[in-house]
Each structure stands twice: as structure tokens, then as C-alpha cells.
Image: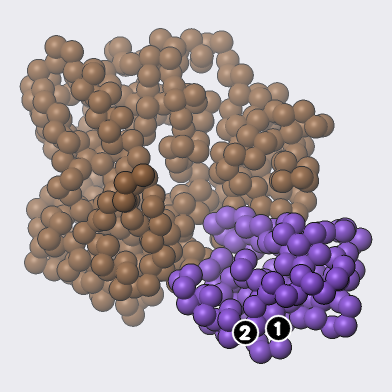
Chain colours: A purple, B brown
Amino acid sequence: METKKDLLYSNDHEWVRVEGEKAYIGITDFAQHSLGEIVYVELPEVGDDLNAGDVFGVIESVKAASDSYLPVSGKVLEVNEALSDSPQLINEDPYGSWIVLVELSGKSDLDDLMNAQEYEEFCSKED
Amino acid sequence: MSDPKKTSLYHAHIRHGGKVVDYSGWALPVQYEGITAEHEAVRNNAGLFDVSHMGEVEVKGKQATDYIQNLITNDISAMNDNQIIYSLMCYPNGGIVDDLLVYKYTDNYYMLVINAGNVDKDVQWMKDNIGSYDMELVDISPDVSEVALQGPKAEEILQGLTDTNLSEIAFFYFKKDVEIAGKNCLVSRTGYTGEDGFEIYMEHEDAEYLWDKILEAGKDKGARPAGLGSRDTLRFEANLPLYGNEFSPEITPLEAGFGMFVKLNKSNFIGKEALAQQKSEGLKRKIVGFEMLGPGVPRHGYDVLSNGKRIGFVTTGYNSPTLKKNIGLAMVDIEYSELDTPIEIQIRKNVVKAKVVARKFYTKHYKK
């Protein structure tokens, strides 16, 4: 399983890349691996105001649909439209394939997230 | 919930990296490396499935034939020895108890192969309907391991392990006492994938040895172990029904589109009256194929709508690995069952356009 040092991670296997007041969010290598081949990604609407813990997308593998939970509160600024046509990009490059870009409501949500090392330890217990 | 039961091949699944889940009370792999890769292996080469969870019931005795004729919807009167037929078993109201394969050894001796999740219910139902028939039932499910080798290269691979000429086992026939890699097996040319292939019944103690031998023999022919995930996508593309999806006690074989396995012209059988009546009155609903026109994967249980009104439910749906399209089967009110009828599928909060299409998503490649 691969992690990236400059990202933050949630218990639900999302990653967060903070850039100033904004954050890119995707799912981790661990998540894409356990889901298997991804065949469809349902994206939120640009402009949606979401709270930490809300479902912001649905990732469909061959077998099932899985909800993705937003690890931080914020407003959806952009969605990665490339995933509509090529959902398998998440399998190929999970950390390069962001799902949403949000404007952070605040930075306090970030305190609940893990760094790469903590996340690796977390995953080793999940397996 | 009690712990799921392990088949004789449990350790083989772990060795191959199988992702083991609880399926109908059995610990079985949903996949090894990936559903799509396993699906494609079966369509192009071969895949090996552990199907030891299936139930087997022997029917023996002077009136075995009469008993089965009364129990099931298909007609076994013209069967040859070593032949197999597919059938439904219904309640008096026409709802489905289960679907099954009937293996005929002789007029006095049959084996019925039933679904894992239904074994207890089915065996009870079979016992309840013995009445005065002179025969006995033996549930041999706990004593049998079973694997399915499926795909265009199945015969070539299995032939390398036996002196029995497998080409002599015709579609829906079986042969007992076939030696595979020195082990005694019953081999039938049957399956649940839409491809040519075999189902192989064996002793528990031989299962893991044979599993490894078959995979080894198939290694350079592209064979791989395959899990329940691809078993479901394969059977779905080939329009093969699954109990719990297309079949249930609330669904009749006619509604499900399997009337060809209901022989209303044979002497009495359980459910005959109700099914004959349903046929003469005409169906009020039936299972159709559909294809999504908008984005999203249809799934088992989703509502089917027409202009916002609920008209049915999805029985199975997938992003088809072979066709790369979002397709499904759905039970709909009869007025929406014509080909090309526009319908809608409720996918979470979205209502997504779809249309009725033929159920023949994939043309079966049986060797007949």
C-alpha cells in the first residue's frame, strides 16, 4: 500500500491535500484496492455546502456502490469531470485523481485527520 | 450469527489471496485478484470456482421418478440415464421454492442439486411432500465437494488429467467414476457462466489436491481461480437466474420468463393449477432486460419508475464486464415490458433514464 507524505488521511480512507483555504479530496490507495475495479463515480454538485461526515460521492465497483464521506466541512468548488468518463483513473493513480476541490469552512476539521505514518498504522490494523 | 462454514477448499482460497466473505452461511471468496480479470478469464480461457456450498439430495426408490415429477415443474419422463435437466420447484400458489438440477442415474435413483442458502428449506419441503411415495431422500450435501471449471479451454485443460474421453460427455449429461488426476469424480457438462465447462463432484479429501492439479494443468492456458463476484456477473450476462434475485416465493417461473421449464401438459405437479391459471389469465408483470441511457450502475433492489410512478424493481444490475455497459434485469408491470419502452431507474437520489431491451445480453457458448 502506498501513501504520500504531504497528505492528510481520514478513518474512511479519504486523502486531503490542503492548499491554502482549499483542499483537494480523493480516496486512498488502500481504498481503491479494497474496492476493486471502479466502474462509476457519482460526483456532488458544484456549490454544494457539505459538513464533515456527509456523503460527497459514490464510488461504484463491479460488485457494489460505496459511499464516500467528506472528511472536512466546506463548499464544493470543483469536481473532477475526468472521472465521469474514466473512473478507472482512481485505480491507476489514486493520489493523482482528486474527486472534489472544496473551500474549507475552517481548519479545525484537519486536526482530526492522520498523517501518512499514522494512517499506515491505522490500515495495518484494518487488514 | 454463527461463523460461516468452511469448504474443503478454504485453505486454497487463502493461499490464492481470495477475499473471503460470508455467502449463504459459507466462507467463500468473492474474488482473488479482481472480478473483471476473473470474468474475462472465464469468457476467454477458463476459470475454476469452488461451488462446494451447493446442496445435493439423493432420491432413491421404486417411486423416485413419480415423486420428482410431482415435486418439480419440468418433465423428467423422457430423460436418459446420465442425463441432467434444469427445473423449478414451486409452492401450490406458483411461487418459487428453488431452482435445481436433476441428475438421473436410473429410474430409481436421482441426485437433485439445489442452492446453498436454500438447503434446509428445500429438504424440509421435499420431506413434506413425500406423502405415500415409496422412496427415500438423503441429504448428501455435507459429504460432497464440488468445483466448476468453466470457459472455452475447460475441456482441453481437464482432458490433460484424465483418460476418459470428455468429448463423449454431451451438454447436460454426466459421467460417474471419472478418474481425474487419479481421484474418483462425477463430471457433468454443466455450469453457470454461459460458457462450455464442467462441474466436478468429489470427496472432500481430494478437493484441494484436485484444485491445485487443475490450476496447474491450466496455468499456461490462462486458467485462474474465480470467485463469487465473477460467478454472478457471468451468470447475469448469460441471462441465467439467481434465487433471491430473479426467483423468490413471491415470483412465479412464468413472471420470471422461465416458462419453458414449466410443463403444464404433464400430469399433476405442485403449483400446476396456479401456473395454468396465471398463463390463461395473462401475466400482470414480468422480468425484462434494460439498458441505462443515463449515468449510474443499476443494482438489485432499486426501484423502476415511469414518469415518477413506481412500476417495478431491479432484480440484478451491473456494469457488464463483457459489454462495458450498465444493464440490468427488472420485474416490471406488463404494460412496460415491450422492447424499447422508456423506463427510469431510481439510483439513490437520481432518477435515471433507461429502456427495455432483450434479455439476451450475451450469447451463450455451449458445446452441444
In this image, B305 relative to B208: left or right? right
Chain bearing tag 1 is A
User: Label 2: which residue?
Assistant: A116
Using the rendered image, report if marks 1 and 2 lie on a common chain.
yes
Q: Position of residue B325 (x, y in %)?
A: 65, 56
- Image: B113 above or below B363: above
Chain bearing tag 2 is A
- Image: B351 above or below A109: above
Mark 1 closeness class: few <14, some 14–19, many ≥20 residues within 10 Å:
some
Q: Position of residue B31 (x, y in %)?
A: 43, 64
- Image: B232 above or below A114: above
Q: Secondary structure at mark 1?
A: loop
**B312 and B257: which one is in front?**
B312
Q: Amino acid at mark 2?
A: Ala
**A126 and B13: which one is in front?**
A126
- Dot 1 or dot 2: first in sequence order is 1
Q: Position of residue B133 (x, y in %)?
A: 14, 15
Q: Position of residue B279 (x, y in %)?
A: 51, 15
User: Label 1: which residue?
Assistant: A7
Mark 2 closeness class: few <14, some 14–19, many ≥20 residues within 10 Å:
some
In this image, A28 relative to B186: left or right? right
Which residue lies at the image location 21% right of the left edge and 59% below the top edge? B8
**A101 and B150: which one is in front?**
A101
